Amino acid sequence: MTMGTLARLRKPLQYILAIVAVVFIAIVVSRNWDSFVAAIGRMSPGWIAGSFVFGVLGVLLSMMSWRSVAHAFGHDVGIGRAANIVFISQIGKYIPGGVWPIVTGSRLGLEAGMPVSTTAITLMVQLVTSVATGSVIAVGVLFTFPALAGHYWWLVALVILVGVVMLLPPVMNRWLALTFRLIRRSHLLPAGIRGAHLGKATLWSIASWLAFGVHLWCILTALGGVDLGTLLLCISGYCLAWVAGFLAIITPAGAGVREAVLGLVLVGSLSTSELLGVVLVSRMILIVVDVMLFLIALGTSHRLRPMRASERPVAVDPTL
């Protein structure tokens, strides 16, 4: 596909993606609307606003993680262009199948001077990084069990230590190479990935998870009373629920799976009615965040002129 063809089809494709995603979002919202209204009516507006802010922050930090991955692959993508690629493509996660964000992002990456295959790989690596960091943080759920925290804390700490080692850039380089060799896509990885930027991507991803955890904690707090003791549970529990939802690729954005796992994690801290309210409000707020950022990126995309071949940056040698 030439850049001219892409320029002509870019807007129609984006609107088609938006329409399909909105249909699936509308289905999720309509099925849970009455329960959502009942739940949010019992919550403090100030804490709900805080939850929204941290939801936005979580998505922004996730975008910065992808931008660092792109830098690790030798492409200096500006923040505006990175936001355009990530926020528009991520609306596709509400369409069942799990591949739409990568398909859409790959086409948008062409306008930033990135080959389709490179953009696809960077989006995949960012997802793998999110799953890896989220899985490590999710182990924190085990600390909420008194028996484990009191007698087997060393085992939980060992698991976390192993996870942290796996996230070190030199180690990540090796298991990323192994992963792409297993899926027979080794040729798409550069000879070396810049470890410093890969490390930044990991740190941005961890910061994103912390923000999403605080987002969930704000909703719990909105029910009444500040309890810092539930903060670790919210952060690690959200990570566990997201990873489980991500692995269930047949559901749009992990709908149903994420809520079920969050329910299991929080069941000891909330009543049944409060539990349903918290997971529904969290889901609805994050839908609003995704749609809002998508619309902002779509509305400002005309300011990002597609690069001509002569203007495209030459990728830096990742080994440098």
Image: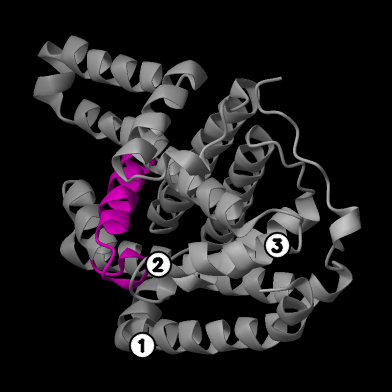
* Horizontal side of residue 290 vs 318, given as left or right: left
Can I make out residue 264 in this image?
A: yes
Location of residue 133 with respect to 157 vertically, above or below: below
Q: Which residues are magenta?
A: 233-256
Q: Residue at x 43, y 44 (%)?
A: 213
Label disc, if present, on residue 110 of the rendered structure: 3
Label disc, if present, on residue 27 of the rendered structure: 1
Residue 19 at what x, y percent from top left?
53, 89
Secondary element at image label 3: helix
Could you give the CA–CA distance between mark 3 and mark 2, rounded to whole angstroms?
A: 32 Å
**Amino acid type of the residue that numbered disc 2 sits on in the rendered structure:** Arg
Image quarter in which the N terminus is found: bottom right
Question: Of discs 3 and 2, which sits in the foreground?
Answer: 3
Labels 3 & 2 near each other (Cβ < 8 A): no
* Horizontal side of residue 123 vs 228, given as left or right: right
Location of residue 151 with respect to 147 vertically, above or below: above
Front-most of 166 and 258?
166
Crowd rating for badge 2 (residues with CA inside 10 Å; few <14, some 14–19, many 20+): many
Can I make out residue 214 in this image?
A: no
Q: Residue at x 81, y 42 (%)?
A: 314
Residue 202 at what x, y percent from top left?
52, 31
Crowd rating for badge 1 (residues with CA inside 10 Å; few <14, some 14–19, many 20+): few
State the residue position of label 2.
Answer: 283
Front-most of 79 and 45?
79
**Amino acid type of the residue that numbered disc 3 sits on in the rendered structure:** Leu
Location of residue 176 with respect to 303 vertically, above or below: above
Secondary element at image label 1: helix
Q: Residue at x 38, y 40 (%)?
A: 180
Secondary element at image label 2: helix
Residue 246 at what x, y percent from top left?
32, 56
